[in-house]
Image (cartoon, rainbow, N blue to C red):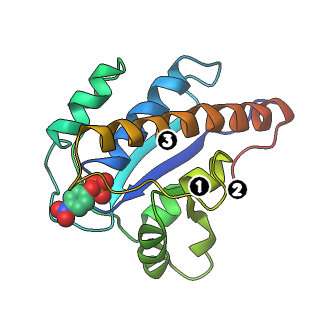
Amino acid sequence: MMAASTRLLVVCLGNICRSPMAEGALRARIEASPLAGRIEVDSAGTGGWHAGEPPDRRAIACARGHGVDIGGLRARQLRVDDFQAFDWLLCADADNLHDARRLAPPGLAARAVLLLDWAGTVAGGEVPDPYYGGRDHFEDVWRLVDTAAQAVVARLSIGAGSGIIGP
Ligand code: 4NP
């Protein structure tokens, strides 16, 4: 049986550093896998200050260094209807998770989870905010989100093979 497509939304605070980097890593890992074309990926920020802007130039440079172009992405704020539009809201840290769940319509708060925890790479783990940090902090973010992206592909591949996919 062909599984339905799974819809993933990565969530951070500003949608200019962590979540666009995770979106880029996920897109690249998915496209290089048998899941290509079957997983929808987007990102959003719990805050709207940077809406309409491209990712932070340090995030773009870091991703480019790993062969992934995220320069075309544009920030947007998380919306209530994202809880219907996506199966999973993969949050970078506990604050993002808390803020996302506060916005959730009745019965849908459980769709918001921690990215690293859901991926299975770091139980209860958070992706630290690199905004006030340096290049090393962006590299740390890339390592965390790209490792998670590989684990997500493995997780969804198992689900696709068994016909069990999505929430
Ligand atoms: P992000 O990083 O949540 O990973 O996109 C931040 C970006 C901007 C701000 C904070 C964090 N800010 O305060 O403007």
Q: Residue at x 40, y 45 (%)?
A: 42
Callout 2: 10 Å neighbours few (<14), some, many (20+)? few
Q: Which residue is mark 1?
A: 87
Q: Which amino acid type corresponds to the residue marked 2 in the rendered image?
A: Pro
Above or below residue 35? Residue 155 is below
Q: Which residue is mark 2?
A: 167
Q: Are marks 1 and 2 in contact (CB under 8 Å)?
A: yes
Q: Quadrant location of residue 165?
A: top right
Q: Are marks 1 and 3 in contact (CB under 8 Å)?
A: no
Choose mark 3 or mark 2, whichever is in front.
Answer: 3
Distance from the alpha carbon under mark 3 to that under mark 2: 23 Å
Disc 3, SS: helix
Disc 2, SS: loop
Above or below residue 16? Residue 57 is above
Image quarter hosting the C terminus: bottom right
Above or below residue 81? Residue 98 is below
